[in-house]
Each structure stands twice: as C-alpha cells, then as structure tokens.
Image (cartoon, grey):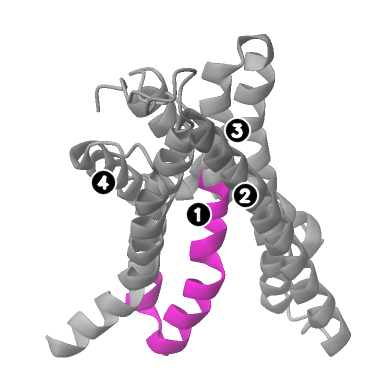
C-alpha cells in the first residue's frame, strides 16, 4: 500500500503542480468547480483512448519503421488525443461562454490536458518496472508537452471569441497546432521503437538524431506556449489598468 501511494504521488505530482501554477496565474480566476470539471473530463480521455487502440491495425505493418511510426504518431496518438481534448474545451468551455479572455483559454486548455496527462502518467508509471525513472522522465517531458499543447489550444479558442474577424483561423489553429506538436514529438520516439521491433537496432548517431528532434519539438512547443501565455497575461493586465477617471477597473465577469 505504501509503495502504491509513493508511485501515485510520483505520477500525479508533476501534472497537479503545473495545474496549480496555471490556475494561480489567472488574475480573474474561474470557479473551482469549473476547473475540477475540466480536469476530470481530461482524465476520461485516457480510458477513451483504449477503445481506439484496435484502430491501429489500419495503419500498422508498414515495412519502413519511419512511415509506420509517422502513422502511429498522428493517427494513433496526436489526432485522437488532441481531438478529444479539443471537444472537451469546445463543449465544456467555449460553447458555455466560459472563455471570456485568452487567459481563460490558457487555464482550461492546460487543465484538460493535464487531466489527461495525470491519468496517462499514472498508467505508465504503474506498469513500468523502473517506475521512478519513468515518473521522472515523463514529468520532465511528456507532462509539460501536454500542458504546452493545451495552452496553445485553449489560447486560440479564447482568441476566437475576442477576434471575430479571425475566428476561423484561431479555431483551426486551436486544433491543428497541438496535433502537429504532439505528432512531431511522438514520431522520433516511435521510429526508434519501430526500428527495434523490426530487429534493426538503431545506431548511436541515429538515436542521437532522434532524441535531438524530440528536444527541438519540445523547445518549439514551449516557446510558442510561453508566447501565447504572455499575450494572455498582457490582455489581463490591460483590463486591470485604471479607468479614465482614475478608478479601479470593474470585474463584471460574474465568476
């Protein structure tokens, strides 16, 4: 029982810590029940992905490991996972009028993504023989990557509500950008796995190149998420500036 608790804390600690940071960054915070609802809906994506696993036979078996990995990265992971996250944000937050500024998108996007990351992390860490190393590796890579994808997705959905003339562009980017980030992150890792499964045993330089590609994608995703996060914070800071008569701005969001 004690080991189970330690493993659960190791798996759930990084996503929950990141979630607390994103929620605390919002100067006009949402109600806790709404945040909790988005988080729990995100956790349900992980078991839902289990029902989609049989579909992988549709693109499995290609002789080229890079092609097989590309299909698996996008059709087996990026499209369904980010698609389900997008549906959570669209129906739970956007259609209910909860995205009143870009920071709302940041918070809800990160919350849904970190809910999924928490459930996925717990599953991977519990099944790993070396659970501590797995928890550390995923806490430094996969969990922040999910958060970055959620920030990008949510910010664009938040901007869609504020920029009607660019609504179609923001809605498209809210889905396509996280899918691209997720797929390109998984592709090098799955290429190495596919090569090993075919008995090819990748060389040292090849593995170095694949890991370097993962790092490049991670850094690019983090930089884009940071840019959108700062843009959302700046929008909130503008709302906090004193009005024309010197009085404090009113917060009429009804939160």
Q: Compare residues 244 and 80 and report the one nearer the observer.
A: 244
Evaluate if marks 3 and 1 touch, with contact meaning CB atoms under 8 Å apart.
no
Q: Identify the residue shown where x is 59% and y is 42%.
A: 152
Mark 1 or mark 3, which is nearer the start of the sequence? 1
Q: Which mark is residue 40?
A: 4
Asked whether residue 190 is in view, the answer is: yes
**Disc 4 packing (10 Å; few <14; some 14–19; many ≥20):** some
* C-beta proximity under 8 Å, tags 1 and 2: yes
- Spot occupied by residue 148 in the image (x, y as percentages of width and height): 56, 52
Quadrant housing the C terminus: top left
Along the polypeptide, which appears first: circle 4 or circle 1? Answer: 4
**Mark 2 sits on what residue?**
225
Q: Is residue 142 magenta?
A: yes
Residue at (39%, 85%) from the top-left corner?
Answer: 131
CA distance separating discs 4 and 2 = 23 Å
Q: Which mark is residue 175?
A: 3
N-terminal-most mark, 2 or 3: 3
Q: Is residue 144 left or right of residue 59?
A: left
Residue that label 1 marks: 147
């Amino acid at each position: 029982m004690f080991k189970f608790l330690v493993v659960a804390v190791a798996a759930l600690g990084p996503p929950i810590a990141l979630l607390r940071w994103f929620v605390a960054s919002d100067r006009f915070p949402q109600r806790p029940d709404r945040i909790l609802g988005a988080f729990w809906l995100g956790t349900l994506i992980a078991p839902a992905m289990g029902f989609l696993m049989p579909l992988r036979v549709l693109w499995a078996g290609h002789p080229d490991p890079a092609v097989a990995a590309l299909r698996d990265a996008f059709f087996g992971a990026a499209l369904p996972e980010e698609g389900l996250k997008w549906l959570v944000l669209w129906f739970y937050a956007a259609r209910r009028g909860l995205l009143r500024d870009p920071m709302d998108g940041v918070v809800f996007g990160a919350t849904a993504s970190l809910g999924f990351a928490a459930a996925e992390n717990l599953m991977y860490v519990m099944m790993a023989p070396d659970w501590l190393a797995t928890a550390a590796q995923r806490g430094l890579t996969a969990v922040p990557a999910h958060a970055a994808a959620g920030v990008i997705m949510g910010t664009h959905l938040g901007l869609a509500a504020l920029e009607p003339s660019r609504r179609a562009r923001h809605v498209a980017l809210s889905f396509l950008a996280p899918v691209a980030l997720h797929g390109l992150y998984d592709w090098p890792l799955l290429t190495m796995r596919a090569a090993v499964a075919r008995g090819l045993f990748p060389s040292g330089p090849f593995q170095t190149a694949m890991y370097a590609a993962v790092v490049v994608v991670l850094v690019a995703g983090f930089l884009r998420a940071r840019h959108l996060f700062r843009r959302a914070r700046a929008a909130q800071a503008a709302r906090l500036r004193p009005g024309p008569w010197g009085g404090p701005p009113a917060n009429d969001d009804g939160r």
